[in-house]
Image: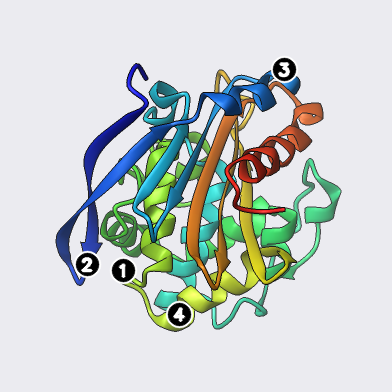
């Protein structure tokens, strides 16, 4: 990004109508330090909902769409609760009884536990309960990325065709926090409950990780979430090239350094 500050218009869904909000975008080249320290290639976006300001490192990549992988567990949870496919985040769902590449996934569990473990088979079961038609309607109504889920209800966020950019992730989470998603308040409250990971000095850190499958090249690692406090809400999204499991901790490490540098957390 050549200019330090740019302006553009984003569209938010408000009560079924498009609402335009001016967002000031600020280039954040200092964040490159943390990617270089971890030998990682990626982008980081922070959206301050109160100030209507977006801080962006690597703007070209921030606008590029990728498969959301397990970050889709956030909207999947909301849709499951909103449609009644699951009664609560503590209802136990079956994992299916098949061997999993992560042994911790090999038991029936609630969405609360499944989100923490990023258990794919539990969320695939949830997606099948929602069904293709209802899922397609909700994904489009949420204005989530390209809005395309194809014809296989339990694979589209893992293998495509669904894709979303880092900027779009922060916009989606902003709509969640602003109550602008077409979903019951109880569904929103449920996902806010199970995404909470840390609380420091009255500030809540919520997030979900993601990692695209081995058939996707290059493999993309995600970490998306938000910080809530009495001063307001901020959403953020990181994605990076991720070759293998040793790269997994880099997502949170880089995100925390970026948030700290931008004065948001820690």
**195 sits to left or right of 53:** right
Mark-to-mark CA distance, 2 and 4: 23 Å
Task: Choose top left, top right, bottom left or bottom right for residue 195.
Answer: bottom right
Helix, strand or loop at mark 3: loop
Image position of 104 with respect to 80: above or below:
above
Q: Are marks 2 and 1 in contact (CB under 8 Å)?
A: yes
Task: Choose top left, top right, bottom left or bottom right for residue 17.
Answer: bottom left
Residue 213 horizontal/vertical position (percent): 61, 32
Residue tagged 4: 84
Badge number at residue 32: none
**152 sits to left or right of 96:** left
Nearest to N terminus: mark 2 or mark 4 = 2
Image position of 246 with respect to 226: above or below:
above
At a point 55% along the width and 18% down the height, the residue shown is: 217
Residue tagged 3: 39
Residue tagged 1: 180
Disc nearest the viewer among 1 and 4: 1
At a point 43% along the width and 48% down the height, the residue shown is: 47
Which class describes the residues within 10 Å of circle 1: few (<14), some (14-19), or many (20+)?
some
Badge number at residue 14: 2
Nearest to N terminus: mark 1 or mark 3 = 3
Closer to the camera in the image, 69 or 99: 69
Residue 167 horizontal/vertical position (percent): 40, 40
Task: Choose top left, top right, bottom left or bottom right for residue 245.
Answer: top right
At a point 41% along the width and 65% down the height, the residue shown is: 176
Q: Is residue 223 visible?
A: yes
């Amino acid at each position: 990004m050549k200019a330090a500050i740019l302006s553009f218009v984003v569209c938010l869904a408000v009560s079924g109508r498009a609402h335009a909000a001016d967002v000031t975008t600020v280039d954040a080249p200092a964040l490159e330090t943390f990617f270089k320290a971890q030998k990682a290639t990626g982008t980081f976006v922070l959206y301050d909902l109160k100030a209507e300001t977006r801080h962006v490192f690597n703007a070209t990549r921030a606008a590029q769409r990728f498969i959301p992988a397990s970050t889709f567990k956030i909207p999947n949870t909301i849709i499951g609760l909103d449609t009644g496919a699951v009664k609560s985040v503590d209802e136990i769902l079956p994992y299916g009884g098949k061997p999993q590449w992560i042994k911790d996934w090999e038991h029936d569990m609630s969405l609360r536990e499944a989100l923490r473990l990023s258990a794919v088979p539990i969320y695939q079961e949830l997606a099948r309960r929602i069904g293709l038609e209802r899922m397609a309607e909700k994904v489009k109504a949420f204005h989530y990325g390209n809005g395309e889920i194809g014809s296989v209800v339990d694979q589209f966020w893992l293998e495509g065709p669904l894709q979303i950019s880092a900027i779009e992730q922060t916009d989606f989470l902003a709509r969640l926090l602003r109550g602008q998603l077409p979903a019951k308040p109880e569904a929103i409250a449920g996902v806010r409950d199970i995404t909470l990971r840390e609380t420091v000095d009255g500030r809540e850190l919520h997030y979900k990780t993601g990692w695209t499958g081995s058939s996707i090249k290059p493999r993309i690692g995600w970490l998306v979430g938000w910080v809530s406090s009495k001063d307001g809400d901020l959403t953020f999204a990181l994605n990076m090239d991720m070759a293998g499991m040793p790269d997994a901790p880099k997502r949170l490490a880089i995100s925390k350094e970026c948030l700290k540098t931008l004065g948001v957390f820690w």
